[in-house]
Image (cartoon, rainbow, N blue to C red):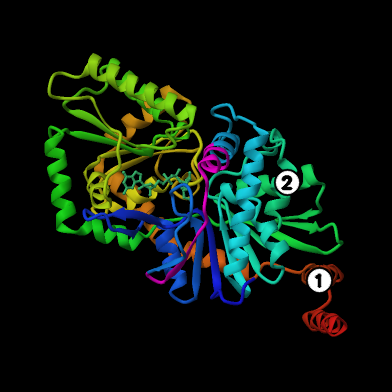
Amino acid sequence: MPATHHQYDLVIAANRLPVDRVVAADGSVSWGRSPGGLVTAMDSVMRERDGAWVGWAGEVGQAPEPFTEGTIHLRPVPLSAEEVRDYYEGFSNDTLWPIYHDVIVQASFHRDWWRSYERVNQRFAEAVAEVAAPGATVWVHDYQLQLVPRMVRQLRPDVRIGWFDHIPFPPVELFAQLPWRRALLEGLLGADFLGFQRVADARNFVRACRQLLRAPTRKDTVTVTAPDGSSHTARASAIPISIDFQGLESLAKTPEVASRAAELREQLGSPKVLMLGVDRLDYTKGIRHRLKAYEELLRDGAIAPPDVTFVQVATPSRERVDSYRELRSQVEHTVGRINGEYAPIGSPAVYYQHHSYPQDEMAALYLAADVMLVTPLRDGMNLVAKEYVTARHDLGGALVLSEFTGAYHELHQAFVCNPHDIEGLKQTILKAIHTPDKDKVRIMRALRRRVSDHDVARWAARFLDALASAPARPERQEQQDRVDEASRTARHAGEDLKEREDRHRRLSERRR
Ligand code: GDG
């Protein structure tokens, strides 16, 4: 820990830094803030603390020198071309991602990839240990960095460590396939607090620890004993992520976005019903199932262009991983077939956009769409669902939402579907189209209330509160157990309040 480094009270570690390299026309290089909820959330907590962010800057080879962007100190971690291939595209996206998403595609297991994952995680941990102030709070993000909590704990036993899982945590039956399952769980158990999108994810994690490590568990806590005999308690709970409600709502309310939304509808041939899908081009997002249901609705004559049309934004993603390349060609083939079969000249049935848009254009698309199709086969949360309802300050529109998303657990008033059930999905889409406006307004109001009450700033604050109050030391947990036990005994014996208080006091005195 060189004394020359400035150290920070709050350290975020995530695969990517929240910035993108911008090359100006004159060739000069600078950094621009990448848009996204996580950055906004961190802004809200870093305003009050001295914060640093450890992550990859997005380019292979030597990392840029640490720098400051806005209020955040950025500490780039270098990755070589082989590490991007093995740690990132390989182990993270072709081993863990499929296992954690119900094995929609087969996972690949390669020992080289695992070794690279370990090496890169160690590098992240060392960078964290270097910038964390004594007693700092360290917040590690996501499946790419599951070994980091334990590695940081070994380097810096003084810091408090949290980990947040942005994607699902799989049932133990699937997780158990991983040859490195023990090391992954032990890596995570270096954390004092682990946050998940759904209660089921937290439960899956605790169950995996119990079954695969034989670790003692109690409700949402796991007791971890290190080889040296020292132990600590890790707590796992659901703290679902959200978005910057106010920021997006204000953007959607600007006259520019409103007029762009109207212009988009006109450019799309002024359909009576505009359907929209916005996803990374990922097999978890259910794009093929969505297209199948849509194609069958056209075939059945239940809908037809130009009255009904569908815009699918499919943001390029992980294009060097085979399963993603295959998905792209299947989706593009299907879109071509649908348009060839069902669209008259000048009125496409599907507008397929394989590129990304600026945020104001996304807001205009949301505002223009009558039916938003969010149909993943499995998704940790799905922020698009939350963004859509946030943009609909006019209370218009209808959200079709898969029950296999984390978002479903908060937005269950939406038009809920099981994307595997194509017949059911078709009926849900028709229901979203034909439900009377007054009912849709009522639904939209409820959905918006949920997101506005649970925005991303609240998510970050809840996570940090949970981390701050997690039982970092086992003695603390034992004390709590003793107090719980005393109050149970007191209740059973029918003691009155005074006696119970006396008992607690005696216990506390004994502890001191
Ligand atoms: C992981 C989990 C979890 C997409 N296209 C454009 C664009 N986007 C933005 C959306 C949204 C974000 O990307 C995608 O978020 P999701 O939640 O849908 O999905 P993942 O990327 O899979 O993220 C997921 C999330 O982590 C957070 O915890 O919800 O379950 O898989 O914000 O708006 N944004 C812009 N142009 C585009 O073309 N500006």
Q: Give the residue at x 37% y 53%.
A: 446
Q: Is mark 2 within 8 Å of ligand 1?
A: no
Residue bounds of the magenta highlight: 70-89
- 323 or 210: nearer the eye? 323
Q: Secondary structure at mark 1?
A: helix
Q: Position of residue 313 (x, y in %)?
A: 30, 37
The amino acid pointed to by label 2 is Ala
Q: Is residue 85 part of the magenta span, yes or no?
A: yes
Disc sitting over residue 475 in the figure: 1
Q: Position of residue 366 (x, y in %)?
A: 27, 46
Q: Position of residue 465 (x, y in %)?
A: 57, 69
- 484 or 184: nearer the eye? 184
Q: Quadrant of the C terminus?
A: bottom right
- 489 or 480: nearer the eye? 480
Q: Is residue 188 above or below residue 231?
A: above
Q: Is residue 223 above or below residue 102?
A: below
Would you call the spot at circle 1 few (<14 residues within 10 Å), some (14-19), or many (20 or more)?
A: few
Q: Give the residue at x 12% y 43%.
A: 263
Q: Secondary structure at mark 2?
A: helix
2 or 1: tag closer to the N-terminus: 2
Q: Can you see residue 455?
A: no
Q: For the residues carrying marks 2 and 1, which lies nearer the camera in this image?
A: 2
Whether residue 253 sits left or right of residue 145 in the image: it is left
Query: Mark 2 highlights which residue?
Result: 183
Q: Give the residue at x 82% y 84%.
A: 505
Based on the displayed image, in which of its 4 quarters is residue 497 positioned?
Answer: bottom right
The amino acid pointed to by label 1 is Glu
Whether residue 477 sits left or right of residue 26 in the image: it is right
Q: Can you see residue 479?
A: yes
Q: Is residue 210 part of the magenta span, yes or no?
A: no
